[in-house]
Amino acid sequence: MTPNTLRIATRKSALALWQAEHVAALLRAVHPELTVDLVPLSTRGDEILDQPLATIGGKGLFLKELEVAMLEGRADLAVHSLKDVPAELEPGFALPAILPRADAADAFVSNDYADLASLPLGAKVGTSSLRRQAQLRALRPDLELLDLRGNVGTRLAKLDAGHYDAIVLACAGLERLALAARIRCRLAAPDWLPAPGQAAIAIEARADQPATLALLAVLDDADTRLEVSAERAMNRALGGSCTVPVGAWCTVTERGLHLRGLVGDAASGRLLHAQADGEDAEALGLSVAQALFAQGAGEFLGTDG
Ligand SMILES: NCc1[nH]cc(CCC(=O)O)c1CC(=O)O
């Protein structure tokens, strides 16, 4: 039976609410007969801000409460930043739609400096992302890297309060919050890689609700799905944890898919890079992961596979 209401579970941060409202507007446009409501929820990932994500249980923390709401019938779908969705989705759930990707680059944000190269020796840069830390170390071993968690507004406020000379955020998040003016320069591929799935919004729903899945699938963007599938397949093959820096960037070209990947060691700043072309997203992700393992990625990942 086709539902007449779609309830969207969302986190309460400004970015999460923007993304959920965006999906609500798209759903109302394609299904004018449906009522679409938001169900804002608090997640453990939002509440525990004094510890790095990697030590408190990783990215799944941002999804758990939203998934419980769907299982208990309090919501029909959840909207996520795909980069916050773990490489292995919780069993019983699906991603029926992935929206067209925004700018996947990271943003260098500073009140005093135009770009990374202009930062003085030993400057303080805030980011809790191991991927961002590893790439910063590789480019500028002299920098002092400091933890910085919290939502986008909190991070900008800490920069403005003078705790850091610069911080690194995602361009997509800043753009969605009408804060693109804060971007001093883009940190973009091929010199800098984003997180797997960065800048794509994912819709999650229960795998056992075919009528709901069909309503949501209308919003899926085929090219973005191919790109992020390759990135996430690579990440999964590398172990898919958020305790190791992993960057990935796939684009659809006339010749098929092109995927670049990196694995870093946050402590040493060593980075391994690999890239390949292919037709099949899953196979391409695997082959780039294998190329990274062949260069010794297993050492960084704490595995020998
Ligand atoms: N880590 C939180 C998070 N999750 C998604 C985005 C940005 C939006 C996106 O990538 O879709 C952000 C903020 C940031 O990294 O600056």
Image (cartoon, helix red, strand yellow):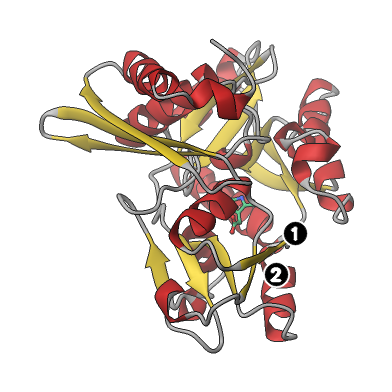
Q: Is residue 182 visible?
A: yes
Check mark 2 vs ligand 1: CB closer than 8 Å? yes or no: yes
Q: Is residue 47 above or below residue 166?
A: above
Of 53 and 220, nearer the camera is 53
Which residue is identified by label 1?
149
Q: Is residue 137 above or below residue 255?
A: below
Distance of label 2 from label 1 (alpha carbons): 7 Å
Q: Is residue 241 left or right of residue 32?
A: right
Of helix, strand and loop, which one carries label 1?
loop
Circle 2/circle 1 CB separation < 8 Å: yes
Residue that appears at 32% across and 19% down:
284
Which image quadrant: the C terminus?
Answer: top right
Of 230 and 139, nearer the camera is 139
Which residue is identified by label 2?
155
Q: In the picture, residue 68 is in which quadrant?
A: top right
- Please identify the residue farthest to the left as the structure is shown: 254
Q: Mark 1 or mark 2, which is nearer the start of the sequence?
A: 1
Q: Amino acid at mark 2?
A: Arg
Q: Is residue 33 visible?
A: no
Q: Residues within 10 Å of mark 1 (few under 14, many from 20)?
A: many
Q: Amino acid at mark 1?
A: Arg
In percent of width and height, residue 71 lies at 80, 21
Residue that appears at 42% across and 76% down:
115
Of 21 and 279, nearer the camera is 279
